[in-house]
Image: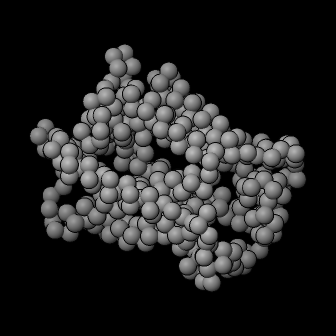
Amino acid sequence: MILSNESYVPERWHGTMLIIAVASAAIIFNTLLSRKLPLVEGIVLVLHIFGFFAVFITMWVLGPQGESKEVFGSFQDNAGWGSIGLSCLVGQLGPILSLIGADAATHMSEELRDASKTLPRAMVWTAISNSILGFLILVTFCFTIGDVESVLGTPTGQPHIQIMYNATQSKAGTIALTSITITMAIFGCVNNVATSSRQLFAFARDHGVPFGSFLSKVQPGWDIPLNSVLVTFVVTVILAMINIGSTVALNTIASLGIGAILSSYLVSISCMFLKRFKGQPLLPSKFNLGKAGIWVNGIAVMYLSIAFVFTYFPTFPHPTPDVMNWSVLMYGAVVVGSLMYFVIKGRKMYAGPVEYINRDY
């Protein structure tokens, strides 16, 4: 870290090695320590809460105090879009990251007891509690940000680290606060590996991807889809290698993931909205939004439609080819390839979970 060694010059391969190290730790937790995941996640929850108060209190006590009219009434178009509204819409990429984790728990539903009752409630309360904490920490950083231009031009490359340093005026204190956020991010990767591997397993079990029999196999004695977990790790390592050649390419792939998740939300929620709009019955469930369901679905579809489009915008106008957001091209290629696979082979094999559920009922 630059805060502890100002002569350090980060190289692209350093970032690749960090990605592989974090992915390796996530794999260990998801294989050898899989039975301990509930305990680990409970400990991380405690760290999450105490870590929030550590950052929250430190910033308010030591940080520079801005004025309310500047925080809530001042807007800046630092990217040069020429419009505050357009700049805010393009700048959604960062905040959207906080919305795409809500579905993570659903991929673990088959390993939960009474999932149809406990899972939706857990998701709702997680969203409510984290939204409150996230809003409070956002307001805190806005009040203690100080000079915006100097923060954006920080030598650390991470504006939030510079804000912490400006508040504490201590390298040790800044490293301690930053370590909290890094630790939470690492354990977030543990959950990402768990959910992505289960999603791959479930899709493979339904013959929705190539090599389905291999990916859906559960090794005796493991009680986890070990093959899907290991394939998830291998793919992560391969993608990390791209960073050595081009950071822009890796960032494009990362933003591609956001667009892909938003499109999956858009498709699934639109289906729910249409069924409610047509008055068609839904599958039996222990959690129901009642009459508010169609309004919640409708608002979600409208917002996702807008957010999905701006996900593929470049970070600033008139970009050069080397910093252009090429994720829309990659997204289109993946969609076309997936459709071709489905037409040629997938439609002959894929039945889908809905048919299995109906068959059971």
Question: Which quadrant of the rendered structure holds the N terminus?
Answer: top right
Q: Residue at the location (41% across, 36% down)?
A: 197
Whether residue 260 sits left or right of residue 205 in the image: it is right
Q: Residue at the location (60% across, 35% down)?
A: 20
Residue 76 place in picture, x, y as percent = 68, 78
Question: Which quadrant of the rendered structure holds the C terminus?
Answer: top left
Between 62 and 232, the residue placed more toward the observer is 232
Whether residue 360 sits left or right of residue 21 in the image: it is left
User: As displayed, is residue 32 above or below residue 240?
Assistant: above
* Outermost top residue: 221
Between 301 and 331, the residue placed more toward the observer is 331
Residue 88 place in picture, x, y as percent = 57, 74
Whether residue 22 sits left or right of residue 195 in the image: it is right
Between 43 and 312, the residue placed more toward the observer is 312
Residue 225 place in picture, x, y as percent = 37, 28
Q: Identify the coloring.
A: one colour
Q: Residue at the location (69% across, 75% down)?
A: 78
Q: Quadrant of residue 134?
A: bottom right
Question: Can residue 182 be seen?
Answer: no
User: As displayed, is residue 87 above or below residue 308?
Assistant: below
Question: Can residue 109 be seen?
Answer: yes
Residue 141 place in picture, x, y as percent = 71, 61
Q: Residue at the location (57% across, 51% down)?
A: 250
Whether residue 243 sits left or right of residue 268 in the image: it is right
